Amino acid sequence: MFERLRKALGTSGNTGPVPGRPVSNRDVARWAADQRLAIVTHPTEGHFDLGGDLHGHPWRLECGVPTRDYVHGLELTGRADVGADMDAAVMVINRPLQDTLESTAYDAITDTLQTTVDSSLPEEMRWLAMYEEMVWPGLPASFREHFAVVAERIEFAQRWIHAPVVSQLLNAVEGEGATERARAPLVLMLVRGRVYLRMEHAERSLAEIAHARQLLLVAGQAALQNLPPMSVAGPDDGSAH
């Protein structure tokens, strides 16, 4: 089943204008127009904002200067406001980044003789210190080889990390250039009712942008389908006061 889904969800066709050349903002704008996506390009090449709608829920994918030290070059960050259960806290992180952040967090805590997790650390680093890695029957060994699922409660992880999400993540670490892509930082989170994506824009290709967008949408769709939505009176609703 996972193999069929990976093939169905994988990017097809020629998504790169010239192999080996970093994609230009003009290329991205042309691709976005073909996909009927809203786009704002910036004067600096490689910097842009994409946006769209997922069953009435807005999503956004941005590319620009990294906001994390572990990302080099350009950073792709995405957010889908899917209105999932506010108690759901799940993170998928690739293994090389997990190893790096766990080592960094350990050094930070031991160097300062802290007994609690420093709130100034990046959220993904704090989660690795606070939450356990989740494993359950049916999660493919190939997925566990490349990614870790960290969560506060396993039931949320099981309901979100379904076959389409697993397949889309595996698309990034298989095929030509898979070794390099497997090492590039990638974090996918479900928290505060939203899906967040952070990854290194290592290849500077349209295929990589298309994959980031598809991963964000597939993860958002999984949250919409498999997790209970927030109540109509959300956390920012003034009627609670």
Image: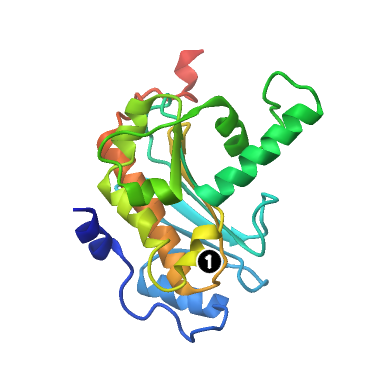
Q: Residue at x 36, y 52 (%)?
A: 217
Splitting the image into 4 quarters, where does residue 193 fall?
Answer: top left
Percent position of residue 132, x then y:
48, 28
Q: Residue at x 67, y 71 (%)?
A: 44
Q: Residue at x 61, y 31 (%)?
A: 126
**By what rule are the colours in the image chosen?**
rainbow
Q: As drawn, which residue projects farthest toward the bottom?
A: 18
Q: Is residue 138 above or below residue 170?
A: above
Crowding at dot 1, Cα within 10 Å, few <14 / some 14-19 / many 20+, comes out as few
- Residues 229 and 125: in front is 125
**Could you tell me the amino acid type at mark 1?**
Glu
Percent position of residue 136, x then y:
31, 33
- Residues 194 and 143: in front is 143
- Residues 90 and 59: in front is 90
Splitting the image into 4 quarters, where does residue 6 fall?
Answer: bottom left
The residue carrying mark 1 is: 180
Percent position of residue 103, x then y:
66, 40
Question: Does residue 139 appear to the left or right of 70 in the view shown?
Answer: left
Q: Is residue 105 above or below residue 16?
A: above
User: Can residue 121 be spotted in the picture?
Assistant: no
Q: Residue at x 28, y 43 (%)?
A: 162
Percent position of residue 166, x then y:
33, 49
Splitting the image into 4 quarters, where does residue 214 fall?
Answer: bottom left
Secondary structure beneath dot 1 equals: helix
Q: As drawn, which residue projects farthest toward the top?
A: 241
Question: Does residue 12 appear to the left or right of 131 in the view shown?
Answer: left
